[in-house]
Structure formats: structure tokens, C-alpha cells
Image: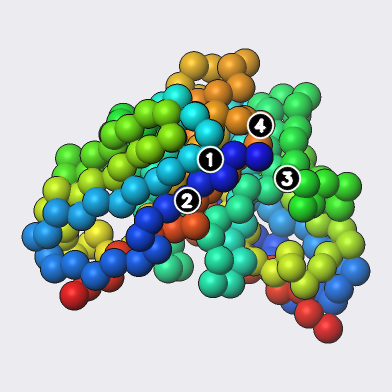
Amino acid sequence: QVQLVESGGGLVKPGGSLRLSCAGSEFIFSDYYMSWIRQAPGKGLEWVSWISGGSSYTNYADSVKGRFTISRDNAKNSLYLQMNSLRAEDTAVYYCARVLSTSGYHNTRGWYFDLWGRGTLVTVSS
Amino acid sequence: DIQMTQSPSSLSAFVGDRVTITCRASQSISSDLNWYQHKPGNAPQLLIYASSNLQSGVPSRFSGSGSGTDFTLTISSLQPEDFATYYCQQSYSTPLFTFGGGTKVEIK
């Protein structure tokens, strides 16, 4: 069925790196913008990054800008998040999500996340 | 940045109760407001987009309303499977998205 499945989480030391993956199935992956969203323990949801269908456009939350890089491989129906210089505050469950828009991606308003994965846990600790 | 404030942060209710959750934006966001349901260990699920549009497959007991700064998610008759945490999310200031702090709905 239509789904997203994340992988790649684990325990990493502060300052370390980790690469998350998200595999999409049963939809035309390249047609959609995609995003990463995270939830720290006991906290709410925090948007992390998004990428356009053809990888031309990306954006990041200030909290991860310069440390995280989002990318995708449409031939493999996969989304990635390269996380460098990890900090304890990056500890969270990381979700990938499909982005839709009420009026097309060219309009910067009205975007929402219509399909989510179950997440992968990243723990940053010494 | 636009801040989103949900209230209450938690509530207890009986099966069959009518439940209302409020989300307030720090500035006007027109109708660019979405609602999600999240159960522990599960993928979050989109309930409502653009303030009042029911996502396909979502039961009709869920409804959304509001515009400007004040928004409401209503569950007309709470069911056992509705016990979860609910989040609002503004999409007015894309490319930067903001979620509310969440409202946990528990069984009374």
C-alpha cells in the first residue's frame, strides 16, 4: 500500500554523524515534495527540512541549518537526511512525510503533510 | 516566526463526549491551518487541511473551523480509537512550518 518507511536511526556520540533513509512505495515519488519532521522525547512535533520533487529546492529549520542535508534519489524512491555535528538536543524520533499543497507547490502557502512514516529514533549521547 | 498555541494541553473525556480543541496563531494565518492525530508508535495522521477540509478516509465526526488567528478541531462523539495527541500546524509562513504544542486526549 501507499507508505513511507524510515530507517537508519541509532545511538551516536555528540559531534558524530548519521544518515537517515525513507523509502516510499505505491506512489510516484518524484511527483511530490518531501519533508523530515522530528519529535524529541516528551515534546511536540518540529519541522526539520523539505526538498522539492526534482531536488532543486530545499529548506531547513534554523536549528539544523548548516549541519543537516536533505537529499533524494527518485530512481530508488528514497529520501535521505545526512546529519552531521549532532548534539544532544537532536535526540528525537525522525519522521519522513509527503508534502501536498492546496494550490500547487509554487504557492508558498497551504502546504500540509498527508502521508507519514512511523519514524526512526536517533539518540545522541556519550 | 509565527507561534501556535494549543489549548488545553490535555483533557479527559468519556466515550461519546463532544470534544473541542483550540489552536491560536500569533498572527493572522488566513485558513492555512492543518490538524493531525498521533498515537504513540504510529505514524501521525492528517485529519483536516486548510482549516475545514476533511482528509479522505477520516471519519466525519472530525471537523475543523476557524480563520485568522483562532481555530477549532471538534470531535462530535469521541470514540475509543480517538484517544491520542492532536497537533495543529500552520502553513501560512511556508517554507517554515510551525506546529502547536499538542493536546493529549485521554479516557475519563
Name which residue type carries label 3: Ala
The residue depicted at 75 percent of the width and 33 percent of the height is A58
- What secondary structure is found at the residue carrying circle 1? loop
Residue assigned mark 4? B95
Residue A62 in view in this figure: yes
| Residue B26: mark | 1
Q: Nearer the viewer, mark 4 or mark 1?
A: 1
Q: Are marks 2 and 1 in contact (CB under 8 Å)?
A: yes
Residue drawn at the location 78% of the way across and 24% of the way down: A56
The numbered mark 2 sits on a residue in which chain? B
Q: Position of residue A100 (x, y in %)?
A: 50, 29
Q: CA distance from mark 1 to mark 3?
A: 19 Å
The quarter in which the C terminus of chain B is drawn is bottom left
Q: Nearer the viewer, mark 2 or mark 3?
A: 2
- Per the image, label 2 sits on a secondary structure element best described as strand
Disc 2: CA contacts within 10 A as few (<14), some (14-19) or many (>=20): some
Identity, as a three-letter code, of the amino acid under mark 2: Thr
Instruction: Select label 4 or label 2 by which is in front.
Output: 2
Give the residue at mark 3.
Answer: A61
* In the displayed structure image, the side of residue A103 where residue B35 appears, left or right: left
Observer-nearest residue: B26 or A38?
B26
Disc 4 residue type (three-letter): Pro
Tell me: residue B92, above or below residue A44: above
Q: Residue furthest bottom?
A: A126
- Write down the quadrant of residue A20 in the picture: bottom right
Kindly identify which numbered label has been placed on residue A31: none
